[in-house]
Amino acid sequence: MKFYSALSIATVLQLVGTFVHGDVAESVSISDFEADFVTAQIVPEVLTAFNPSVAFYAAYESADGDEAVLMPEAGAPIEFSVENISNGTNVTDASKFIIYMIGPDVPSRSTPTSRNVRHYLAGNFTVSSSNSSVLTSATKLENSTVATNEYVAPTPQSGTGVHRYVYLLYAQPSKFDSIGLENVGLNVSDRMNFNLSIFRTQAGLGPAIGGTYITMDADSGNATSISTDSTKSGGASSTSVSGALALAPVLGAVVLASGL
């Protein structure tokens, strides 16, 4: 079993549909998350700054039941989880959380005229009493309410190079205990050109307390990420994925235009 988050140029894993069974996941440090956002130029191209105070993970499941981040046949994430949540900025025992996933490189990283595409947005996440099914030192985040924008998987258009997909975690302002995220001026139906600064102002959000990301190479069909298992400190494993546009199917009732 493997669990992945954030890209490391030094430890690139090209993910395929199955993994070797029995691998043990390990934590990624907050400083590594912060550094990798800079390495991938998410800071400053997408975010002006990123100073996480918690380790935040997103897990996907492959066809054979192994858990990992971003499998070619992956649907929506099977879970979100956190470590050190008590250290989160503006976090209390009663805190709820907002999570979104954006695609900043649309139609391509060189010409991101539709930055950002909102692939997922949901609030009212709470820290559960259950540990992650992938990384036992992490605790699951759970949400029993309907997402503002249900998950729509990436479909980068062939020939557009590497695309980054970024998850961010925020402490949720208490006003959203009684209203939805759609009530702050957000155009829920328009997922294109999602302005992060405007949304933070509308919602009254502080800085992101955690984040992770994945990449897809629309030319070679490879997905890459940093591993939380032993490959992080040593030999990187590598397999290949064929078919750039087969990396993740578009799911759900809402279907975005291809190339996102």
Image (cartoon, grey):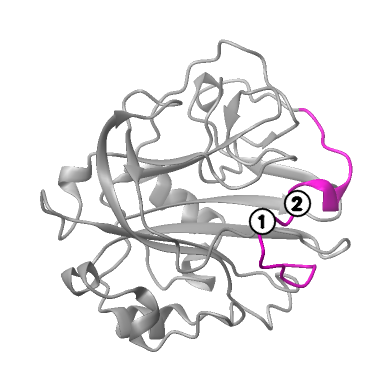
Q: Which residue is mark 2?
A: 249
* Residue at x 69% of width, y 22% of height: 64
Where are the magenta residues, as a range? 239-260
N-term mark: 1 or 2: 1
Quarter of the rendering occupied by the C terminus: bottom right
> Magenta includes 47?
no
Q: Which residue is mark 1?
A: 153
Q: Quadrant of residue 23?
A: top right
- Where does residue 57 sit, x and y in percent of width and height? 43, 42
- Where does residue 188 sit, x and y in percent of width and height? 50, 79
Q: Nearer the viewer, residue 127 or 5?
A: 127
Amino acid under disc 1: Ala
* Residue at x 48% of width, y 49% of height: 36
Q: Quadrant of residue 241?
A: top right
| Number of the label disc, if any, that sits on residue 193 | none
- Where does residue 212 sit, x and y in percent of width and height? 47, 50
- Asked if the residue under mark 2 is in contact with the one under mark 1, i.e. CB atoms within 8 Å, the reply is yes
Placement of 121 over or under 34, stated as above or below: below
Q: Is residue 178 left or right of residue 94?
A: right
> Magenta includes 256?
yes
- Mark 2 nearby-residue class (10 Å; few <14, some 14–19, many ≥20): some
* Residue at x 69% of width, y 55% of height: 251
Quarter of the rendering occupied by the N terminus: top right
Secondary structure under the numbered disc 1 in the rendered image: loop
Placement of 68 over or under 24, stated as above or below: below
- Where does residue 197 sit, x and y in percent of width and height? 40, 82
Secondary structure under the numbered disc 2 in the rendered image: loop
